[in-house]
Image: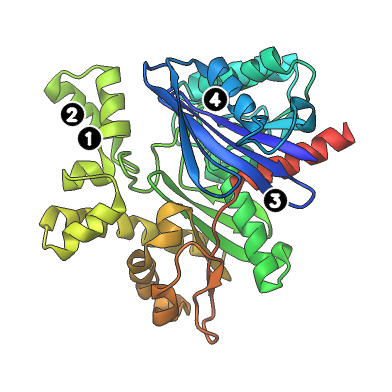
Amino acid sequence: MNILVLNSGSSSVKYKLIDVDTEKTLAEGGVEKVGLPDTFLKFKQPDGTKATIELGQADHKQSIQAILDTLTDPMVGCIKSYDEIDAVGHRLVHGGEKFNSSVIITDEVKDMVKQCYDLAPLHNPANMTGVEAIEAILPNIPQVGVFDTAFHQTMPPASYMYPLPYKFYKEDGVRRYGFHGTSHRYVSARVCEILGVDITKQRIITCHIGNGGSITAVKFGKSVDTSMGLTPTEGLMMGTRVGDVDPGALTFIMKRHNLSVDDLQKIINKDSGVLGISELSSDMREIEAAVKAGDEKARLALDIYQQRIIKYIGAYAAEMGGLDIIVFTGGVGENQTGLRADVCQPLAFMGVKIDIELNAKTRGTETIISTPDSQVKVVVVPTDEELTIARDTRDLVKNN
C-alpha cells in the first residue's frame, strides 16, 4: 500500500511516498519558496542523486501537481500513474481539544480544523492548502489528518491548564496543547522496541531538539506533560523562538518600545532564542564552531540552551516519580554529540551514565549511548514522523 505523506507549510511542501507494507521510502523531496517567483522542487532520484526543477511562481496546488508529475515521470519517477497512490496522509499542526487521534478527512473534519486557525494561524491554514490541493487534483483518494497536538491530549488538567482566569480556557481554549506529538509518539514507542521493554511500564523523557524543540514526559505510554504550550513558543530555548520568559518582561518591552502585537510576535518567534542571544546564527553547528573560536555570546547561547534541557528533564523525572529512559531525537538531538554529553553529565545524580566515546561518534543512528551500568537508559532515536503518518493513514483507510 503506497501512502503519500504531505507536510504543507506556508512556503514549502515536503513529501514522502512510502510503501507502508514494507515501510520503504519510494521517493522524497520538497517544494520550497511556494508562492514566490523562484519556486523550486528538489527531490531524490531513483539512483539516490538529488535533482532540482525550477517551477517559476507556483502556489500550493501547482507545487503538489509538480510533485505528482515527478512521481509519475518515466525518467525520474517511481510509479506509473496516480492510481498507485492508495491514500494521502497530512501533517496537521493544531487540533485543539477537538482531536485526540488521527482521522479520515471529511468536510466536517475540515470545518473543525478551520475552527482551530486562531490557535495556529501560521500552520493550520497552510496545512489545509495541501488537503484542498489533493481534493482538486485527486478528488476520489482518501485523505487522513495526523495532528501534532493529538498525542498530548492525555495530559491531566494540572499539566495543561494555565493559572489564568478560568474564563479564558472556557471561552477561548487557552491552555497547553504541546507540539511535535507525532515525533514524541514515534520515538517513545521505538525506543521500547530497541530496548525490548514494555512501554506501559516505562517512564520516558523524549527530547525532540532541533531549530524548534520540545521535551515530553511519557509515563506508561502516555504524554503527561510537555514543554510547548498554547503555541510552539513556550518551553525550551530554540533557534529563533524565545521559549520560557516572564510575560511581564514582554509587556515591559512592548510599553518601553511602543511595540504592536505583531512586533512582539516577530520578536518572540523570529528574533529570539539562539539567534537573539548569540547575534550570530540560529544554527547550532555554527554556534558550536563559534564557541570553539572563543565567541562569548555564542558560549552564553549554548549554556542557556543546554540549561533549559537539563531543567526540563529534571522536572519531568520528578513529576513522573522517577525515570527509566531518555531519548534524544531531532536534528540537534541526533547529531550534536557535545550537547548530549553536556546535558547528561549533570544528571549523574539520577544514575545517568553515558559512554563518552560511543556518544562522540553517534550521529543520526539508533544507538544506546548509556553505559551498561547506567540506571537510566539513554538512547539516540532518529525520528520518523512521516512513517508514523503513513501507518496511521493505512490503518484508518483499511478500517474505514
In the structure shown, which secondary structural element does the residue marked by tag 1 occupy?
helix
Residue picked out by circle 1:
249
**Distance in Å between CA atoms under marks 2 and 4:** 26 Å
Q: Are marks 2 and 4 in contact (CB under 8 Å)?
A: no
Amino acid residing under circle 2 = Ile
In depth, the one of 194 and 171 nearer the eye is 194
Crowd rating for badge 1 (residues with CA inside 10 Å; few <14, some 14–19, many 20+)? few
Residue 255 image point, x, y percent: 17, 22
Q: Is residue 168 left or right of residue 23?
A: left
Residue picked out by circle 2:
253
Residue picked out by circle 3:
24
Amino acid residing under circle 4 = Gly
Which residue is rendered at x = 53% and y = 60% of the image? 205
Which residue is rendered at x = 40% and y = 55% of the image? 332
**Distance in Å between CA atoms under marks 2 and 3:** 50 Å
In the structure shown, which secondary structural element does the residue marked by tag 4 occupy?
loop
In the displayed orientation, state which residue is furthest to the right: 399
Residue picked out by circle 4:
173
Q: Is residue 387 above or below residue 68?
A: below
Q: Are marks 2 and 1 in contact (CB under 8 Å)?
A: yes
Q: In the rendered image, which quarter is residue 149 located in?
A: top right
Q: Is residue 262 left or right of residue 370?
A: left
**Distance in Å between CA atoms under marks 3 and 1:** 49 Å
In the structure shown, which secondary structural element does the residue marked by tag 2 occupy?
helix
Amino acid residing under circle 3 = Lys
> Image quadrant for the N terminus?
top right
Q: Are marks 3 and 1 in contact (CB under 8 Å)?
A: no
